[in-house]
Structures are given as structure tokens and as C-alpha cells.
Image (cartoon, rainbow, N blue to C red):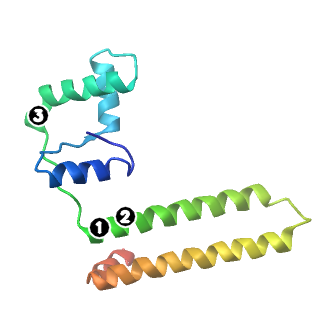
């Protein structure tokens, strides 16, 4: 199966729970494989055939997928959401820099987004603390 952001996870979990061997293929790898075997069309049907061909030819090089722990999934979700929030705030700040008429209202909005970021960061720290990983995190932060 092709790893597609987070959209593949539910299907991969269901297949794994049903006892199927699941092999995850990175989209970047598959794209290069497509070029290497000179397939130009990109449709769902072509992608399915390409994945089957990749599996047939590269199975010895692949390792079965193992679901991530609930803790890892929770952290990954929080990190992704924080990144999206920071990206949205940064984009807004850059696009509103020269808007003098709504400066105060916009500053309030930015401060609200920063408070929300802080809340997400606190949740990340809480999960890391619960998992007993804060010592390692603090050590990494010193580097």
C-alpha cells in the first residue's frame, strides 16, 4: 500500500488486524519506480498495477509494516497539528504586515493563535511526560 499522509492508516490497521501482511511503500519511491519502468499515465488503476508490480519485483527488499504505538500516533498527530497551526499563523502574519486599518484586531487574533499553539505544546509535553520521555527531550534540546 502507498503511504499517503495519514489517509492509509485506517486501512492498514484494518488489514493488519485481519491478519494480512501489510507492506508500506513511500510515494516518493513509487514515483521514481514509475519513471524507472517508463509508465507515464497516473490513474488509480495504473497505480494499483504499479504497486502490484513493485511488490512482485521488490518483495525481498520490503519489510512488513508494524502499526505504531498509540503514544507515537498521538505525538505525531499533535506535531502535525502544531506545524499546521504555525504555518497558518506565519502565513497570516506575512500577508497582513502592511494592513494598518485592522492592526489591533489582527494582533489580538495572532495572540489567540499563539495561545492555542502554547496549549498544543503543553499537550505534547504532557504526553511526553506521561511516556517518561522528557529526560531524553531535554537532553536533545541542549544540543
Disc 1 and disc 2: Cα gap in Å? 6 Å
Which residue is label 1 attached to?
72
Q: Residue at x 40, y 23 (%)?
A: 43
- Circle 1 sits in a helix, a strand or a loop, which is it? helix
Residue 115 at what x, y percent from top left? 61, 79
Which residue is label 3 attached to?
59
Q: Earlier in the sequence, mark 2 or mark 3?
A: 3
Residue 44 at what x, y percent from top left? 37, 27
Q: Residue at x 30, y 31 (%)?
A: 30
- Circle 2 sits in a helix, a strand or a loop, which is it? helix
Which residue is label 2 attached to?
76
Disc 1 and disc 3: Cα gap in Å? 27 Å
- For the residues bearing labels 1 and 2, Cβ distance under 8 angstroms: yes
Q: Relative to 117, is 4 above or below?
A: above
Q: Earlier in the sequence, mark 1 or mark 3?
A: 3
98 relative to 30 in the view: left or right: right
Amino acid at each position: 500500500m502507498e503511504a499517503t499522509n495519514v489517509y492509509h492508516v485506517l486501512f492498514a490497521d484494518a488489514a493488519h488486524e485481519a491478519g494480512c501482511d501489510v507492506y508500506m511503500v513511500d510515494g516518493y519511491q513509487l514515483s521514481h519506480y514509475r519513471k524507472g519502468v517508463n509508465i507515464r499515465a497516473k490513474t488509480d488503476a495504473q497505480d494499483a498495477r504499479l504497486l502490484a508490480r513493485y511488490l512482485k519485483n521488490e518483495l525481498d527488499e520490503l519489510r512488513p509494516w508494524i502499526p505504531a504505538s498509540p503514544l507515537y500516533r498521538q505525538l505525531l498527530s499533535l506535531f502535525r497539528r502544531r506545524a499546521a497551526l504555525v504555518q497558518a499563523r506565519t502565513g497570516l502574519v506575512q500577508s497582513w504586515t502592511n494592513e494598518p486599518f485592522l492592526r489591533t484586531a489582527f494582533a489580538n487574533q495572532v495572540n489567540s493563535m499563539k495561545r492555542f499553539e502554547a496549549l498544543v505544546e503543553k499537550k505534547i509535553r504532557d504526553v511526553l511526560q506521561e511516556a517518561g520521555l522528557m529526560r531524553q527531550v531535554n537532553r536533545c534540546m541542549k544540543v
